[in-house]
Image (spheres, helix red, strand yellow):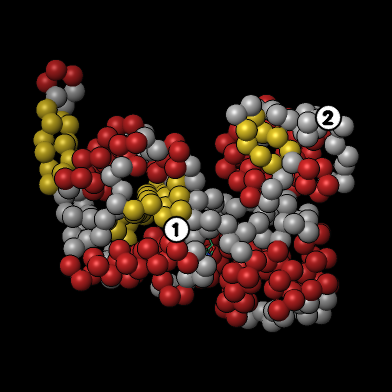
Amino acid sequence: RELVSPDADGEERQIEAALRPKRLAEFIGQARVREQLSLVLESALRRQRPPDHVLMNGSPGLGKTTLAMIIAAELSAPLRITSGPALERAGDLAAILSTLGDGEVLFIDEIHRMARPAEEMLYMAMEDFRVDIVVGKGPGATAIPLDIAPFTLVGATTRAGLLPAPLRDRFGFTAHMDFYETGELEQVLRRSAALLAVELPDDAANEIARRSRGTPRIANRLLRRVRDYADVRAGGVVDRAVAARALELYEVDGEGLDRLDRAVLGALLRKFGGGPVGLSTLAVSVGEEPETVEVVAEPFLVRQGLIARTPRGRVATAAAWTHLGMTPPPDAFG
Ligand code: ADP
């Protein structure tokens, strides 16, 4: 995995767990989502009923798992965690649902990647707190209805557009997670620096925040790389210049674009004259899966105003040419 890949693995996960805010009040940014959620949670607590199911939609590393944990914590409810790809058969889901306790929170990450039969079982479970367990095969198979405890489903997806409508409609509320502002990421960084006992001056926090692709997970990761660099090359002192040098070493540029972002942008300009070009063609040209380009690179490039999505494909903006120091062809903006 690349340094700035927004997905986490191994040791990274342990550090992430340590840096996770535990309560809603500690959660930084996403003001609207926080307010929406606090209302949903507070009214559920007053009514002493599990809240409606919650869907969280947004790019990797924006805090979806963290919020799922916070929801359970605020409800003082246990949390069960699984993911779409782990639910290959309806039986996988039935095994979880049938052992949920009253009011438990079930978190399904990457819920758009659930297999179809599990998905259909989930509809009924969400709506009626009931599932049909199919026993036997072929003509002799029978469905045995089974009541399950009222629970709250928290689903997370990077691609809400891929969710079938019947599933989407069964969520009482969808939290749309946006990229974070620089100031919010500075707060995330100051909080993490304190937890990691790193001295982080404001200008260094700003330098890292600006380059974090609007993503707390990346901010936390870059903070650790800057700390490593400072320890080895700068006598342990982090300042703006040290942060900038460290991030350059790790190929994060001044706007936070990483190697994949620049590869996608570079291909769009150099190989396709700025587009329009289809997503799959663009992905092949940088040797990546279309999904990686679509989920990991593109949303940030769009939000930075470097790429536009049009009905005919992806198009580079004037800012993209400027960012890579290139001159667009004379007819580029028509
Ligand atoms: P996702 O599930 O959306 O991929 P996570 O919830 O795993 O993202 O968050 C990734 C990391 O970023 C975690 O270590 C978490 O502590 C940190 N993080 C995410 N959102 C926030 C936030 N709003 N405030 C502070 N830290 C955050």
The numbered mark, 1 or 2, whose residue comes first in the sequence reads: 1
Q: Which residue is under mark 1?
A: 65
Is 176 positioned to the left or the right of 137 in the image?
Answer: right
Residue shown at 74% from the left, 41% from the top: 317
Q: Quadrant of residue 77?
A: bottom left
Residue 113 in view in this figure: no
Front-most of residues 256 and 38 = 38
Q: Residue at x 77, y 62 (%)?
A: 247
Which amino acid, by three-letter code, is at mark 1? Thr
Q: Residue 311's x, y, as percent?
A: 60, 29
| Secondary structure category for the residue under label 1 | helix
Toward the front, the furthest residue is 334
Residue at 63 percent across and 70 percent down: it is 183
User: Which picture quadrant has residue 149?
Assistant: bottom left
Residue 162 bears which disc, if any?
Answer: none
Query: At x 25% / y 40%, what residue is drawn?
Result: 123
Residue 263 in the image: x percent, y percent? 75, 41
